[in-house]
Structure formats: structure tokens, C-alpha cells
């Protein structure tokens, strides 16, 4: 009765949470494109889009993505084998355990008419799947706390995920081991299924189970004579063999049973197996009820994100469906840190202690803004700084294992902040720096032979990429390919220093020319200059870092 009531409560909370989450996908508005689209329009557009996709050739694309990216998780495999193996152990082991064991009345019993949880191969498979989850959790702890993968952050949601899975798995194995050696569980089985009345028969069956099934008895001790064991075997095959395989097949539980055998009778008297049963099923039900609000929700949202992004494209798909897809992406993020590891500006975090610089850390504040949460002025400024340091290089989007179009999300975040009245930091910096350094015109500038400002050179080496300015030999490839330069008939008059000249000004330590050039602030971060440099100079990264240095200089001076 208690079990059924608890299950009903857990399922009710799970259902309501799932409904709330799904409704949020049609309510949350990210960016100006979604502001004027009502929820009803987004719901109807989603239904139409799903139907039209399922009855088109795109269904084969969905099938391919489902097999490769959802089931086999090839995207993760391309990035890191260890992480893929860890994830497959946790995801694969847990899902198989859920289907075969937790939902056995609906799945396994339907597929196999002779199913019993204490029969082989089901007993072996249950332990195998559970062992995979335990192995995956061990690898997760290793990666986070021993290997310490760069830019992989751990928060309370990660701790919860690891703890709740550990409790479920460990309590399950302990429960299995305690039941193997439990004398009282053996007695319950005999009374319910044995139909034995003769004391000799009961004693013979008990002796056989002590010898072959590892139970620890109050009454009988080995060694046993052959006649007793033979009678016990006959009774076992007649009454028990149809639903009980030897416990050695449950290798995890059997190992625990062997370990606790010396204290088995004390544990049995204390009803430890009953306590473990309550811990196990309550942990399972709590995880189920809390799933829509925890990190585990990505097992629903991430596949949807992968499937939606495979068949949708901005500019071609319905605006309403694009808005809904972006809301789904907020829940699909697993905070795996792949985007942060590939981020072209993450190195700035060493100088500017703002975690919102990292793509994976931007998702939480963006979700808070999308859901209408009120943030303080300070929180918004921190979010703004992190969002505008982004170069829109698209590296995060390309490597995201769940297919999130992160670049579009960052653009929407910037639009939101502009709507709230926050000026773009680069516009502010250009205005202030114009007064501080004077935006220069190279045609009117006379360079004096002064010692180089070595402090500028030492500051501009936050990464190996930025330090490549020193190998520039002035071929002007970067300037020729630059779309900003090409936009003007006389670019030097408008922009001051051109890209190749900025590289030389850094090498000469000309701080005022470097920071005062309009080219520095008008750069689109399109990376064309960097891609076409024959010397491998990371021109865009240098320009980007110079902007950060200029802003830091002003922040220190004005205490902003």
C-alpha cells in the first residue's frame, strides 16, 4: 500500500513537472523575433511542423540522427573517447536497467513469458547494467575531481545527479546481496511457494540452499550428508528451480553477499534488507519526481534538440518553431563544457574573473532571463560583460554534442540587453577610448622615435595565439581580405591603422596608436584575416585581445 501511494505521488509530480517544462517551451521568449508570437501560434506551428516532417523525406534525416547522435552519441565520440565511454555506461546502463528491471511488468514480462527477476539471464543482465552505471559514475568522478578537465565546472545540480544515481545503484546492490544471505527471505519463499509440511523436507531444502545458494541459516550448518542434499535438490527442482537461478549469476550482489556472510544473521535480525528496500525505492521515486527539474531532464530535451536542429534552419523554418526550438535548447544543455573548451576567448577568464565568459555558463542566466526572472543591476552587468566578450566565431555551436545553436542564443541575449537599455560595451569603449587615446588618422599622425612600450607587449600574450603578432612581415593579406577595409574608398582615412599596421604597432609598443585605431573597434570578428594569413598570425585573436586590454585599462582607471 505504501509503495503504491508513493509511486502514485512520484508519477503525479513527474507528470506535472513534465507538463510545466513542455509548456515553458511554448511560453519562453528569447530575442526580439519571439516577442510578438503568441503561445497558441507556437503550439499550432509545432504540430504542423511535426506532421509535415514525419510525412516527408526529412523523416530519414530524423532516423539517422536518432541512431547516430541520440543512441550511439557519435558527436561525443568525435570529441573524447573517455567521455563517450563514461556517458554510454551511465546512459546505456541506466536506460536498459529502467526498461528491463524498473518497468519489468510492462516491458520484460510482455516480451518474455517465463520472466522472473531471480532467473538467469535476467539476474545477470540486471547486475551487468547496474555495474555499467557504477563504472560510468566512477569515470565521471575521475574526470571532474582527479583528471580535472579544463573549464568543466561542477555545481549543485551535478552533485545531485552523481549522488542520487549512486544511492540508487549502491542500495540496489546491497539489497540484492542482503537478500541472497537472508534466512527470513528464504523462509518467506518456502511458506509462500514450497507447500512443505514435513520437517525433514524443510530441513533438506534449507540445507541445499545453504550449500548452493549461500543463505545463512539459524538452524542448519554444514557439512551435509549426500542424502540430505539429494532430497533438497529434488525439492528445489520441484518447487524453486522454475523461478530461482544460482545467485552466482548476480555477480555484484553475490560478491556483496560473500562479504557480509559473517554478519548475515545479525543483519537479518535487524531487517537490514527491509531498510535497504525502502532506501532503494524511495531514492528511485524521488529521482523520478524530481527529474523534470534536475539535470536529468536533458535525457528528454537533448534528443529533441538534436532532432529539431537536424531538420530546421533559420530563415527557412517557421519563426514560431525557431522560437520554440531555442526554448528547448535551454533545457537540452548538459553543461558538459565542450563549448567552453573550444571557446576562442575563454583564455580571457584568466584576466577577467567572470564565469559568464564561458559558453556553458551563459546558459543559466539566459534561461533566467527567458523565464522572466528579475535580476539585479549587478547580475545583468556581469551577464552583459560575458555575452559581449563573445566573438561570434561559431566554434561552440559546431562542437555542441546536443546540437544547440549557441551562436543564435548569444545574439538573442545581446538583443535583450540592448532592449533593456544597456549600451553595447564595445560602443561604450570606443567612445571613452576615443577621448582617452584619441581615435587617430594615420595620414595626420607623425610617429616619433621613442622607446617601445614593453608593458603593452607583455600584456598582449594571454595566449599562444595572440603572441603570433610578432611573426607578421607586412604582406597586407589580412588588410586586403578584410570586409571592413573593403567597405571604404579610403579606409586609412576612416579607420586609422589597418590590420597589418596594428600588428606592427603592437610589436613597436605604440599603445596610443593601437588602442586609438577605429579598425580595432570596427572589427567584425569574421576571422577572414586570420584564415588567410600565410604566416599563421592569429589576427582576429590579437585584435580581440587588444580590445579587452583597452577596456581593462579603462576599468582600472575609472574603477568601473
Image (cartoon, helix red, strand yellow):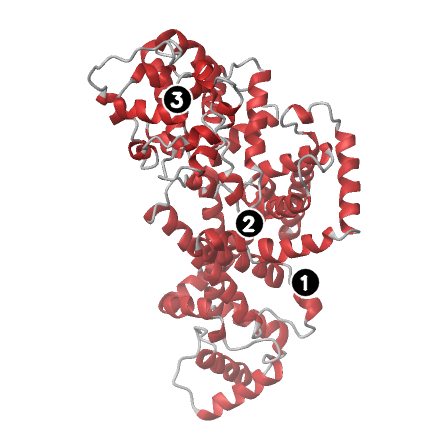
Instruction: Report x, y in % for residue 416.
Output: 59, 21
* Residue underneath mark 2: 282
Could you tell me if residue 249 is visible in this image?
A: yes
* Residue underneath mark 3: 547
* Residue underneath mark 1: 105
Indicate the quadrant where residue 349 lies.
Answer: top left
Indicate the quadrant where residue 552 lies.
Answer: top left
Could you tell me which residue is drawn at 53 percent across and 47 percent down? Answer: 401
Instruction: Report x, y in % for residue 162.
Output: 46, 48
Along the line of sight, which residue is nearer the eye, 37 or 184? Answer: 37
Q: Is residue 238 above or below residue 344?
A: below
Could you tell me which residue is drawn at 36 percent across and 51 percent down? Answer: 142
Indicate the quadrant where residue 81 lies.
Answer: bottom left
Sequence order check: which comes first, mark 3 or mark 2? 2
Instruction: Report x, y in % for residue 480.
Output: 46, 30
| Disc 3 crowd, CA 10 A, few/some/many (<14, 14-19, 20+) | many
Q: Which label is found at residue 327?
A: none
Could you tell me if residue 276 is visible in this image?
A: no
Q: What distance separates the C-alpha of mark 3 from that of mark 1? A: 63 Å
Tag 3 near tag 1, CB within 8 Å: no
Amino acid at each position: 500500500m505504501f509503495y503504491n501511494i508513493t509511486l502514485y505521488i512520484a508519477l503525479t509530480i513527474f507528470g506535472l513537472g513534465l507538463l510545466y517544462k513542455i509548456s515553458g517551451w511554448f511560453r519562453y521568449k528569447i530575442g526580439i523575433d519571439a516577442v510578438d508570437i503568441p503561445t497558441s501560434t507556437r503550439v499550432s506551428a509545432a504540430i504542423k511542423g511535426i506532421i509535415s516532417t514525419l510525412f516527408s523525406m526529412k523523416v530519414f534525416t530524423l532516423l539517422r540522427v536518432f541512431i547516430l547522435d541520440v543512441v550511439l552519441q557519435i558527436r561525443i565520440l568525435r570529441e573524447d573517447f573517455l567521455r563517450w565511454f563514461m556517458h554510454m555506461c551511465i546512459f546505456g546502463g541506466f536506460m536498459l536497467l529502467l526498461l528491463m528491471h524498473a518497468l519489468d511488468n510492462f516491458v520484460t514480462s510482455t516480451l518474455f513469458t517465463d520472466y522472473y527477476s531471480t532467473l538467469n539471464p535476467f539476474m545477470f543482465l540486471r547486475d551487468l547494467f547496474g555495474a555499467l552505471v557504477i563504472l560510468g559514475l566512477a569515470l565521471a568522478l575521475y574526470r571532474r575531481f582527479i583528471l580535472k578537465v579544463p573549464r568543466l565546472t561542477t555545481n549543485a545540480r551535478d552533485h545531485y545527479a552523481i549522488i542520487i544515481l549512486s544511492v540508487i545503484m549502491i542500495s540496489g546492490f546491497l539489497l540484492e546481496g542482503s537478500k541472497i544471505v537472508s534466512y527470513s527471505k528464504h523462509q518467506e519463499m518456502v511458506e509462500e511457494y514450497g507447500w512443505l509440511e514435513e520437517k525433514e523436507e524443510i530441513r533438506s531444502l534449507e540445507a541445499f540452499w545453504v550449500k548452493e545458494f549461500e543463505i545463512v541459516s539459524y538452524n542448519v550448518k554444514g557439512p551435509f550428508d549426500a542424502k540430505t542434499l539429494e532430497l533438497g535438490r529434488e525439492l528445489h527442482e520441484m518447487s524453486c528451480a522454475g523461478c530461482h537461478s544460482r545467485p552466482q549469476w548476480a555477480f555484484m550482489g553475490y560478491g556483496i553477499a560473500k562479504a557480509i556472510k559473517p554478519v548475515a544473521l545479525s543483519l537479518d535480525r535487524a531487517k537490514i534488507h527491509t531498510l535497504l528496500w525502502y532506501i532503494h525505492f524511495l531514492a528511485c521515486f524521488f529521482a523520478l519526481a524530481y527529474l523534470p527539474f534536475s539535470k536529468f531532464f536533458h535525457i528528454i530535451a537533448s534528443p529533441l534538440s538534436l532532432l529539431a536542429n537536424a531538420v530546421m534552419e533559420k530563415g527557412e523554418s517557421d519563426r514560431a518553431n525557431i522560437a520554440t526550438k531555442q526554448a528547448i535548447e535551454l533545457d537540452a544543455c548538459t553543461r558538459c563544457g565542450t563549448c567552453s573548451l573550444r571557446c576562442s576567448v575563454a583564455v580571457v577568464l584568466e584576466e577577467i574573473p567572470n564565469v559568464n565568459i564561458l559558453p556553458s555558463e551563459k546558459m543559466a542566466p539566459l534561461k533566467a532571463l527567458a523565464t522572466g526572472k528579475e535580476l539585479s543591476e549587478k547580475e545583468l552587468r556581469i551577464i552583459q560583460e560575458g555575452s559581449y566578450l563573445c566573438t561570434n566565431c561559431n566554434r561552440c555551436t559546431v562542437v555542441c554534442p546536443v546540437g544547440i545553436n549557441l551562436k543564435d542564443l548569444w545574439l538573442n541575449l545581446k538583443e535583450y540587453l540592448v532592449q533593456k537599455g544597456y549600451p553595447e560595451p564595445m560602443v561604450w569603449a570606443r567612445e571613452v577610448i576615443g577621448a582617452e587615446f584619441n581615435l587617430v588618422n594615420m595620414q595626420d599622425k607623425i610617429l616619433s622615435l621613442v622607446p617601445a612600450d614593453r608593458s603593452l607587449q607583455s600584456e598582449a600574450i594571454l595566449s599562444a595565439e595572440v603572441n603570433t603578432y610578432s611573426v607578421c612581415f607586412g604582406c597586407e593579406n589580412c588588410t586586403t581580405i578584410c570586409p571592413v577595409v573593403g567597405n571604404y574608398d579610403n579606409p586609412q582615412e576612416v579607420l586609422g591603422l589597418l590590420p597589418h599596421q596594428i600588428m606592427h604597432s603592437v610589436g613597436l609598443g605604440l599603445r596610443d596608436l593601437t588602442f586609438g585605431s577605429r579598425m580595432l573597434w570596427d572589427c567584425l570578428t569574421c576571422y577572414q584575416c586570420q584564415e588567410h594569413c600565410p604566416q599563421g598570425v592569429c589576427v582576429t585573436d590579437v585584435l580581440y585581445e587588444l580590445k579587452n586590454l583597452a577596456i581593462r585599462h579603462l576599468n582600472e582607471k575609472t574603477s568601473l
